[in-house]
Image: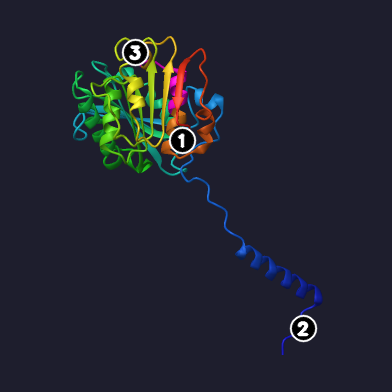
Amino acid sequence: MRAALPRAARSLLAAGTLLSAVTLAAPAQAAANPYERGPAPTEQSVTAEKGPFAVETIEVPAGSGTGFNLGTIYAPTDRSQGTFGAVAIAPGFVTPKALIDWYGPRLASQGFVVMTLETIGLTNLPDERAAQLLAALDYMVASSRAKDRIDASRLAVMGYSMGGGGTLRAAQERPALKTAIPLAPWHVERGWQRVTVPTLIFGADNDFIAGVATHAEPFYQNLTAAREKAYLELKGAGHSSFVAPNTTVAKYSIAWLKRFVDDDTRYDRFLCPAPRPDAAIAEYRDTCPN
């Protein structure tokens, strides 16, 4: 025969049983976004030259993969937060990789694996650059030394001038990409109605090579199927404004990549409501991320 429990013990047992029942009945809280990387953003963090992640530089010699020439990978060294999204970046017509290398550590230090490309030929046309961007992404996720740090489901492309035109073509050819960022894009094609990838297009008001009236603006307007889109026009800037460190370009590229590669809504504050024209921005148009 079991000894009777003291009254106090019976009360504690009953309370514990009730608490367990309430806990089981309560709906589970939604899990935090598993793709968030790094602390909550601030104006200072998105404009800083270095983000919160230390970065490793990995040279990719010619012959390392197929479909592209060579490049440099910049990858966060922190492996404690899981994998990162990856971005491939192409330069413009007769533009060496060295002029776009500044994007590598700037973006990687914010929590991305980034590869800057030296194209097969300096005079490669936009569609050739598109193929090389996609080949570089395939190499990054399958064979690169950083492959174990990359989430193959979260990839993006970026490019300058003809590399920007190639970025649009790559987005059209591979709709599984999470986003595309053409910088002062140049392409003979104007209609990009088949692009569904969220796309941020940069232009420059004094660009006389890829003038916004005949390139960036109609490209943006014709992104009629893109899930989200934005257009940022730099003020008092020319075509070469994208080949040297630029705080405005970096800030909005980081925010856009974070929002659409990492699905990180903490960065919505920099994109929506739309930034107003100021000393650096001549015009901004968008669909406001939702």
Q: Is residue 155 left or right of residue 29?
A: left
Horizontal side, residue 240 vs residue 285: left or right: left
Sequence-first tag of 2 and 3: 2
**Foreground of the two, 110 or 90:** 90
At mark 1, the secondary structure is helix
Observer able to see residue 105: yes
Q: Residues within 10 Å of mark 1 (few under 14, many from 20)?
A: many
At label 2, the amino acid type is Ala
Image quadrant where residue 13 sits = bottom right
Position in image of residue 257 (x %, y %): 42, 32
Distance CA(mark 1)–CA(mark 2)? 61 Å
Q: Which residue is mark 3?
A: 239
Q: Residues within 10 Å of mark 3 (few under 14, many from 20)?
A: many
Secondary element type, mark 2 = loop
Q: Nearer the viewer, mark 2 or mark 3?
A: 3
Distance from label 2 to label 3 (Cα)? 87 Å
Disc 1 marks which amino acid?
A: Arg
Using a 10 Å C-alpha cutoff, classify the residue at mark 2 as few (fewer than 14 neighbours), some (14 to 19) or many (20 or more). few
* Front residue (pair 225, 129): 225
Q: Quadrant of residue 258?
A: top left
Please identify the quadrant where the N terminus is shown: bottom right
Work out whether residue 54 can be spotted. no
Q: Main secondary structure of the magenta part?
A: helix
Residue 261, position as x, y percentages in the image: 41, 37
- Per the rendered image, the range of residues in magenta is 243-253
Q: CA distance from mark 1 to mark 3?
A: 26 Å
Which mark is in front, 1 or 2?
Answer: 1
**Residue, disc 1:** 259
At label 3, the amino acid type is His
Tell me the tag on residue 4. Answer: 2
Residue located at (20% from left, 27% from top)? 128
Q: Earlier in the sequence, mark 1 or mark 2?
A: 2
